[in-house]
Image: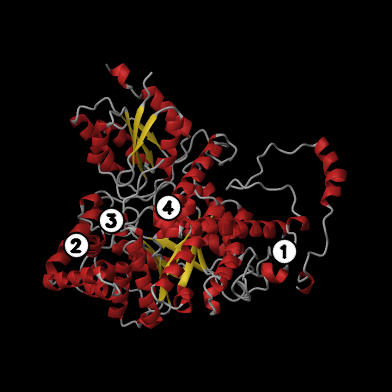
Amino acid sequence: MSGMKTATPPTTSGRGRWEARVLEPALAKAPERSGPFTTVSGRDVRRLYTADDVPGFDYETNLADPGRFPYTRGIHETGYRGKLWTMRQFAGFGTPEETNARYKELLEAGGTGLSVAFDLPTLMGRDPDHPLSLGEVGKCGVSISSLADMERLFDGISLADVTTSMTINSPASMIFAMYLVVAEQQGADWGRLSGTIQNDILKEFIAQKEYIYPPRPSMRLITDVFAFCADQVPRWNTISVSGYHIREAGATALQELAFTLRDGIEYVQWGIDAGLDVDRFVPRISFFFNAHNDFFEEIAKYRAARRIWSEVMRDRFGARDERSLKLRFHTQTAGVSLTAQQPYNNVVRTAIQALAAVLGGTQSLHTNSLDEALALPTKEAVTIALRTQQVIAYESGVTSSVDPLGGSYYVESLTRDMRDGAYGYFETIDRMGGMVAAIEHGYPQREVAESAYKFQQAVEKKDKVIVGVNDFVADREEPIPTLYIDESVAERQLARLDRVRRDRDGGRVGRALDQLRETAAGTGNTMEPLLECVRAYATVGEMCDALRDVWGEWEEEPVI
Amino acid sequence: MNKIRVIVAKPGLDGHDRGAKVIARALRDAGMEVIYTGLRQTPEQIVAAALQEDADVVGLSILSGAHMHVCPRVVELLRDKGLDHVLVVVGGIIPDVDIPKLRAAGVSGIFLPGSPMQEIIDFIKANAQPRLERV
């Protein structure tokens, strides 16, 4: 290692000489393919990277050893030699009972964490009997409307012994309160619970668009969770600041990195403005990135993310606790890269993407299933996706050495470009008054839509080849088996909702919802009244409506 | 010559509007008049927009699995308003088994993931009846 700690790389490449004497004659004999040689994000890639591409490279400031600031090489001293990443497969469909059975299968197959996908009505804070829920109940995830559903979702699963990630944003506080009450019923100590709620509203405004309230009260719900957990659920990850959806919506790798980290900065600023000490809540902030096809660009993205976060937390916010400086992240392979055509090819795409996430040092990983451009995955497809991670972990050998690509001219040059580019975006967004203000102006939304359109044009022109879609097309394809969610799910969930409404103490529900409205109109922490609502079996729709009464709803101006 | 007028709508609760926005822009760049309704439109709102905008085409983007509820309802409401001439197309994740059902319900074009934009543009140009041809 000591040989690399010099201020400049030990040799210069003499690239100019090589180009004149060796390359030119070679090109004259055998020209290159027409290209373009760009990443999936449209970034130009040079023919060859040498020491000339990382001028002034300094080991200590650019990289440092694993476990040391700025953590480019990873937050753990021993990489994956100590502990592998958590293989966390996102799942949820139909009724709580069906999803519960899938979780038990995943745990038995060697999965090490749960990850809950909710259906659209739940994500949008609507009960199954709301008119907008028609046709959506249990389709894209599990339907949860009251504590009764949550009790069945985790039936027979000890919440003290698993870690659970819940992909929920606008109603994150409500669903988290339900999880806490189920844990309470099981006799589990909140102080020992471990898991994550996504709780990232900014990327909803930017990309996924599952928002309910306007940005500012939405931010208050999140800082309330920061404060509540710092006191009562100290091992819970209060937010998963997500680039995944921003990328899926069309962002480039750099935009994903820059907007996600700038979102993170926004949350930290709002937490501090709400009176919290930076080192009390920042250690519980985690991140969630995409793993797309462009192998080295993705690896550079993760490495740059760690470096930037540590620099910004130290220099911008004065964080001192090492845990505030260490960026921890989950990764999911890119759903948007999967093709409906020749779906078995998706296994290969997912494997390449997963390998990038691992070489980038992810803490947990979801691998998509081969059939996800067609439907929610079958059990067989999910198993292959999990096995893909196990092959990387146990057969490929890449886990034996920490940050094995560290020092690669190409990867270090890309990592540096990513970092510099992200700081450029930070400056633009800071000038607008921060991310909330930028979102209110539609800035990141426009940037992402522009990149999505450019990519689609590149695909149409075949500047970007998608195997099986715009090249190497099969004349005829055999259909593969897919999961079909029928309407009986909605019927069963509606019946349960009726029972819950009949059996509960209506007076207690009414009082709890009134208390929630009152707290929301004032400045108190919304978690306490939400816990009482949940214990009274108030529904997600009722709790969200109570806050709609106070805060109103956000509507985006449709722009193309 | 009159431009083809297209309503691009995103019905249901889903907010994944990448496809809707990309196709809206592609149709506009192909010379059509495009009105994008924005998110979470009910079939009633979509048909009201089609009526008000004198649309020739309604394009629906649905990824969430709600297509069997939404698409037939849009066609039915269009017929109720006397807008039988409006071409209805849908893009998104549609299981094979639902394709014949959607066609039977009056959806003319069904475009699955990976469909080239040019194919959608050509389909609309070949099948839409702009106002001048109608009178």
Residue at left offset 35%, top offset 31%: B6
- Label whose residue precedes the other's in the sequence (3 or 1): 1
Q: Earlier in the sequence, mark 3 or mark 4?
A: 4
Q: Tell whether label 1 touches label 2 (CB within 8 Å).
A: no
CB under 8 Å between discs 4 and 1: no
Q: In the rendered structure, which disc, 2 or 3, sits on the residue that comes first in sequence?
A: 2
* Callout 1 crowding tier (Cα within 10 Å): few <14, some 14–19, many ≥20: some
On whether disc 4 and disc 1 are found on a single subunit, the reply is yes
Where is residue A171 drawn, in percent x and y?
Answer: 31, 63
Marking on residue A207: 4
Q: Could you tell me which chain the residue with mark 2 belongs to?
A: A
Depth check: A9 or A164 in front? A9
- Regarding mark 3 in the picture, which secondary structure is present there? loop
The amino acid type found where label 3 is placed reads Glu
Can you identify the residue that label 1 sits on? A407
Per the rendering, the mark at residue A497 is 2
Residue A558 is left or right of residue A416, and the answer is: left
- Rendered location of residue A247, percent (x, y): 49, 52
Residue flagged by tag 2: what amino acid is it? Leu
Badge number at residue B71: none
Nearest to N terminus: mark 4 or mark 1: 4
Q: Earlier in the sequence, mark 4 or mark 2?
A: 4
Q: Earlier in the sequence, mark 2 or mark 1?
A: 1
In the rendered structure, the answer to whether residue A356 lies left or right of residue A244 reads right
Looking at the rendering, which quadrant does residue A71 occupy?
bottom right
| Residue tagged 3 | A553
Q: Quadrant of the N terminus of chain A?
A: bottom right
- Chain ID, mark 4: A
Chain letter of mark 1 equals A
Q: Which quadrant is the C terminus of chain A positioned in?
A: top left
